Image (cartoon, grey):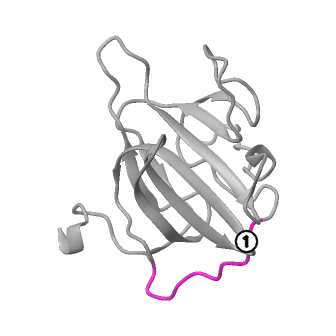
Amino acid sequence: AAQGRPAGVRPAALTPPRLDGLKPGGMAMPVAGRVIGRYQGPIQGSSERRPGLTVSVRDNAQVTAPADARVMFAGPFKGYGRILILAHGENYHTLLAGFGRIDREVGDHVLSGEPVGVMNAGTAGGPRPSLYLELRHEGKPIDPERWIAKANRKASG
């Protein structure tokens, strides 16, 4: 794979996206799963509280960029495991944690919905892997649910 990237993962568009910040409803959920911890609330089955969302996911789930961004940090970070910090412009940043593998490097530009990594595999009989998502504006955590687009639940076919 070129530049240490897994086969099939292409760099983001050659022209970097405009990073105009975020608007309510302007982010996509970066992974399919069940929310088990909400902003400032306890994580299900624990008294731990975090300023973001915790989403229980399937083993090896694909994680995508929640919005157009530039990668500011990619790697291990104390207490979070492997994390990805994305800058969206206008002092908005997303922190994603819980990766088994990160497929982006600092300086990469990613488009909304573009793959950025893969979650860990759970342990036999242990808890399922979970993605932690924290949204910050001007360095302060804010409730990400207002910014995440509501899924269209209508069937098509």
Q: Position of residue 75 (x, y in %)?
A: 38, 57
Tell me which corner region of the image, top left, top right, bottom left or bottom right, holds residue 27.
Answer: bottom right
Instruction: Name the residue located 23 percent from the left edge and 61 percent from the top edge.
Output: 6
Instruction: Name the residue located 31 percent from the left edge and 64 percent from the top edge.
Output: 9
Q: Amino acid at mark 1?
A: Asn
Q: Position of residue 23 (x, y in %)?
A: 80, 64
Residue 33 drawn in magenta: no
User: Magenta residues: mostly which secondary structure?
Assistant: loop
**Label 1 secondary element:** loop
Farthest residue, direction front: 78
Q: Residues within 10 Å of mark 1 (few under 14, many from 20)?
A: some
Label 1 belongs to which residue?
Answer: 91
Which image quarter is the C terminus in?
Answer: top right
Tell me which corner region of the image, top left, top right, bottom left or bottom right, holds residue 156.
Answer: top right
Instruction: Name the residue located 81 percent from the left edge and 48 percent from the top edge.
Output: 146
Which image quarter is the N terminus in?
Answer: bottom left
